[in-house]
Amino acid sequence: MTRYRQPGTVLTDRHFTVPLDHDNPGGEQLELYGREIVAGARVADDLPWLVYLEGGPGFGARRFTGRQGWLGRALQEYRVLLLDHRGTGRSTPQNRQTLPGRGGPAAQAGHLARFRADSIVRDCETVRKQLTAGAPWSVLGQSFGGFCATHYLSAAPAGLREVFITGGLPSLDAHADDVYRAAYPRVRRKNEAHYARYPQDVARARRIAAHLAEHRTVLPTGYVLTPEAFQSLGILLGGTDGSHLLHYLLEDAFIRVGGRHELSDAFQEAVLTTLSFAGHPLYAVLHEAIYGQGDEPTAWAAERVRAEFPWFDPAATLDGDAPLLFTGESVHPWHFEVDPALRPLREAAELLAARTDWAPLYDAGRLAANEVPVTAAVYHDDMYVDTGHSLSTARAIRGLRTWVTDEFEHDGVRTGGPRVLDRLIALTRGDV
């Protein structure tokens, strides 16, 4: 272990070994990384543990400096573990560089199927038993981390002292088609709100999309910026300041070069930073697999369901005079063609999309009999996780208390973290 300090905190790098396949504990092992953080004045105190499960899938836990955001509130009474999910961050990362070593596409797909919430929760249980001497711990799950926490309640509730979920109550039984059928109308509303705020962006977005339709545009890393890829900048619209970020990105798109206009280097760099999956490829590869349950394949649900909402078709939009609609949190087959970080994983992704033997993730009976204190922040009209689905799940989990708010977007635990966590802790303990 390596111990070091930041303002007001003491940090310890921790490494754990877990089975790749928990049903074969003597087989291949993975290394997990977790960053322990404790308030500087409480290093020697016997504090309860709080493990943070990041959103995604595919993202390592947030890297804090000092007592930023919700962490400051948590450190008042917890010893915090920021755990990188398997395959992310410093936990045996899985990407275009490492996965070819597994073998061909079928071997890669079979390997990646072990990186969903069920395996993550079993990892957590292995880690918990090492850190707490068997005592239950608290869990804070953001977005996909909340999906993991919900599975935790289904699979290993004895390991849980209490659970806090922020923007991450999943449907217990919705197919991926249902998820996206609910999502596209929400994304359209986010577009309408953006254009109402920044009407000048209607012409800007159409001009950029038209340019991309006429000129093959390859960004410096080899990312091919097509009109559909440009539309996926709408992922910004689900964040608190995302509409503003999108506006500023669009206003700097073109630069005059001689007698013509070109997309500026600054614009291309900003787009690449937003769209590239190089830092989190599992987000793309496993994005629909996190909904897989039973024998029905996900089969590129976002792409198929999008056809039911023709107003997202960029070609049809450019043929008319309607605003170009940005898309949101969805992954499509063409992502594995335009993004060089994903191209080598295309065949494996196809096999995952066709898979028909996904294990169930949620035990409705066990959740209905839940005894673990659980609270959840549900954000009104959350672009990423359907509010209706979340509230239905909340009703299905015995004792779960919700805080439904329009004060924050999906990233509320980041932008209003201390207040969000404080509210959930108070709800858990019956103080509000």
Image (tube, rainbow, N blue to C red):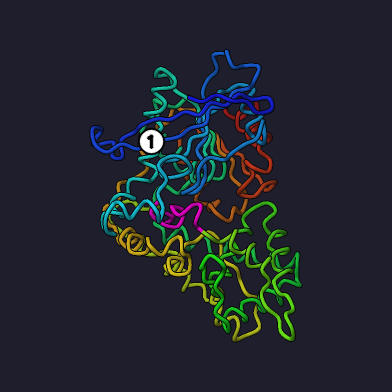
Residue drawn 51% across and 68% down? 222
- In the picture of the structure, the residue carrying the numbered disc 1 is 31
Classify 140 as above or below 190. Answer: above
Residue 374, can we see it? no
The one of 30 and 239 positioned closer to us in this rendering: 30
Element at badge 1? strand
Question: How many dots with numbers?
Answer: 1
Relative placement, left or right, of 409 versus 300 is: right
User: In the image, which residues are magenta?
Assistant: 277-290
The one of 236 and 102 positioned closer to us in this rendering: 102
Q: Dot 1: few (<14), some (14–19), or many (≥20) neighbours within 10 Å?
A: some
Indicate the position of residue 393 as horizontal and vertical percent values: 47, 44
Indicate the position of residue 346 as horizontal and vertical percent values: 37, 64
Indicate the position of residue 297 as horizontal and vertical percent values: 32, 60
The one of 258 and 61 positioned closer to us in this rendering: 258
Q: Amino acid at mark 1?
A: Glu
Classify 432 as above or below 268. Answer: above
**Residue 432's quadrant in the figure?**
top right
**Residue 158's quadrant in the figure?**
top left
Residue 45, can we see it? yes
Indicate the position of residue 118 as horizontal and vertical percent values: 36, 41
Query: Residue 288 colored magenta?
Result: yes
Residue drawn 61% across and 77% down? 209
Residue drawn 52% across and 76% down? 310
